[in-house]
Image (cartoon, helix red, strand yellow):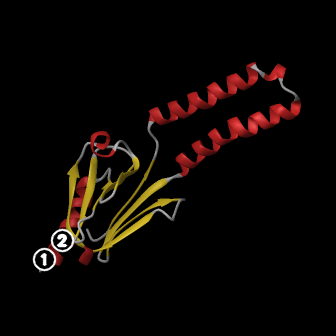
Amino acid sequence: MRIFEERQSFRQWWLFLILGVVILVISIQLFRKQAIFSEQEKIMLIFFALVPGILVSLLIFSMSLNTRIDSTGIKVKWKPLSFFKKQYSWNEISQVYVRTYAPIREYGGWGLRGFGVNKAWNVSGNSGIQIKTKSGKKFLIGTREPEQAKQVLTRYSNNQKS
């Protein structure tokens, strides 16, 4: 295997539940209190209370974490937020391997996580591609396909040692 590509999206049932409950609670509160507001106030309430929740939900469900490992190195980016991207060439990496990690304990959950030299980008699960750079930084990329990632990493890691 020469190239590893993976696309992950937020599709956890509990995330749907949380966002749905928040939008439902806001909607119920707006409709319960609608009699005391004028038409103009109702429109403003909907705009400032309900629309942001729906937009945030749409953003979360349109986001995907895209990872590519090939002969040039490791690339990862969040779509549609393409300003969140990282690229590591093989000569920048001192060590890379697949590992099991504790998302909540080590990074505080899923998403764009971490501070300083130890960061993680993940969507779900507890398997990740751990990158350690020659400058001492650590970066973990979550993966749902650890065995396939391991095969490609072994291929390119061995090529760098020779």
Q: Which residue type does callout 2 highlight?
A: Ser
Task: Quadrant for the C terminus, please.
Answer: bottom left
User: Around disc 2, counting alpha carbons within 10 Å, would you say few (fewer than 14), some (14 to 19), or many (20 or more)?
Assistant: some
What residue occupies the far right of the structure in this picture? 39
Left or right: where 125 falls relative to 101: right
Q: In this view, does 132 lie above or below 158?
A: above
**Tag 1, which secondary structure?**
helix
Residue 149 in the image, given as x and y percentages of width and height = 26, 60
User: Which residue is drawn at the image coordinates 22% and 56% (left, top)?
Assistant: 98
The N terminus, quarter of image: bottom left
Instruction: State if disc 1 and disc 2 touch (CB < 8 Å).
Output: yes
Direction left: furthest residue: 162
Residue 97: which quarter of the image? bottom left
Seen from this angle, which residue lies furthest bottom? 162
Residue at (25% x, 62% y) in the render:
131
Q: How crowded is mark 1: few (under 14 residues within 10 Å), some or many (20 or more)?
A: few
Residue 157: mark in rendering: 2
Q: Name the residue under label 1.
A: 161
Give the image quarter of residue 26: top right
Report x, y in % for residue 24.
Answer: 63, 27
Query: Three-letter amino acid code at disc 1?
Result: Lys
| Mark pair 2, 1: CA separation | 7 Å
| Extreme residue toward the front, this view | 116
Residue 152 in picture, x, y percent from top left: 24, 66
